[in-house]
Amino acid sequence: MIDVALIGTGYWGPNVANSFVATEKARVAGLCDLDPARLTAFSQRYPQAKATNRLADILEDKSITAVAVATPTNTHFAIAKAALEAGKHVLVEKPLTLTTAESLELGALADKMGRVLMVGHVFLYNNTIRVLKDLIDKGELGDVHAMSFVRTNLGPVRTDVNALWDLATHDISIMSYLMDAEPVSVSAVGQSFLNKGVEDVVFATFTFPNGALANVHASWLNPQKVRTLTITGSQKMAVWNDLEIKEPVLVYDKRVDLPSAQELKGDFMEYKTLCVDGGHASVPVKLNRPLQSECEHFLDCIATGSRPLTDAANGAAVVRALEAATRSIAQGGTPVEIR
Ligand SMILES: NC(=O)c1ccc[n+]([C@@H]2O[C@H](COP(=O)([O-])OP(=O)(O)OC[C@H]3O[C@@H](n4cnc5c(N)ncnc54)[C@H](O)[C@@H]3O)[C@@H](O)[C@H]2O)c1
């Protein structure tokens, strides 16, 4: 059993604590929040855990092996740094930090201290994403030409980070994992309608080294909750609907026949005959609890001393793309190089 403390008992933190317990490999030994009402409310669930509004109380407690940080993004760096310096293993919610330099600094500190530092890019622990990765790696879709992510809902509205940093973080981690590469440039636009300087609606298009494109529509000002990814491959196409439980992944045997297309004379009816439509099929997915799998991976890395899938370098790569997209938004959508 590993004793874990949760820093931040707001909306998301309780899910993290409960997921640690569900692994049956960890206990919740400490709870920390600056808000006494939230701390008191959640500590009813874990009455044996040390409940405090002082981070130092957790960090000085030698019986606590690891901390999970689920506080607002602008506090991640300072809390994670203090926890690593105190010799704790640290799981930090996404995005890891507000700057690439901070993420890299935390990674170097974790290495120096010999501790695990992991960022909660939860979708990389989602079986559905692993099924999509498998399809791509086995060449089922052919070459990936484009990806289109939609992550919209009405709320929750944040004031600490915009829709890009809150929502598109997930999609950047997913696209990089699926492509086995980091995007090289981004063009993004966004607008603030509710709170000045905090974009509620963002459209960002990332380009990969092989020319593939990935677009993200991230918004908390939308009438519908949508969580979809469409992958256009040269041979087949796939659609993932994260809100669909029975058939989350559909693979479409659809493409435009390339050799014939090269002979196109531009006639619309001729073009139509070159479109191959072999129908679609549902791909079986053994749905898991991604947050529980994420917590289990963190605990296993502590037990074995191995480096997590979503380590500081992985977190830094996502933050690097977010920083570039932020610059592009500020420049009205001008393409910005990521590296
Ligand atoms: N993986 C996911 O799908 C997912 C979903 C939601 C949120 N998150 C992430 O979780 C983190 C928290 O988000 P949330 O929605 O729970 O926010 P929240 O505002 O509901 O909760 C944050 C809590 O942290 C507390 N806090 C703030 N500063 C603190 C400090 N210095 N020390 C101790 N406590 C402090 C606040 O009092 C609050 O209770 C963010 O990084 C967010 O991106 C991840």
Image (tube, rainbow, N blue to C red):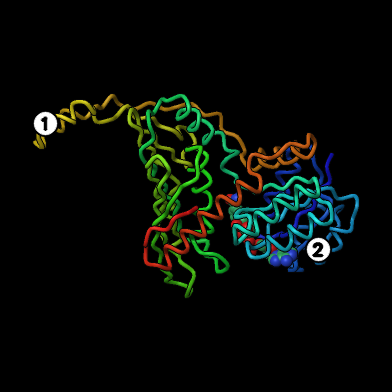
Residue 119 position (above or below residue 51) = above
Residue depicted at 56% across the width and 42% down the height: 123
Residue placed most toward the observer, 121 or 5: 121
Could you tell me which secondary element the residue under label 2 belongs to? helix
Crowd tier of the residue under label 1, counting other residues whose Cα lies within 10 Å: few below 14, some 14–19, many 20 or above: few
Residue 11 visible, this angle? no
Residue 207 lies left or right of residue 317; in this view the side is left
Q: Which residue is mark 2?
A: 55
Q: Label 2 is placed on what type of residue? A: Leu
Q: Is residue 123 left or right of residue 27?
A: left
List x then y, in percent, for residue 210: 40, 39
Residue in the image at 83% along x and 42% along y: 2
From the viewer's side, name the closer residue of 74 and 41. Answer: 74
**Mark 2 vs 1, N-terminal side:** 2
User: Within 8 Å of ligand 1, the CB of disc 2?
Assistant: yes
Decide if residue 332 is on the left or right side of residue 306. Answer: left
Q: Taking 109 as reference, is 156 above or below it?
A: below
Residue at position x 65%, y 54% in the image = 104
Residue 235 visible in the displayed image: yes
Residue that badge 1 annotates: 270
Residue most extreme to the bottom: 196
Q: Amino acid at mark 1?
A: Glu
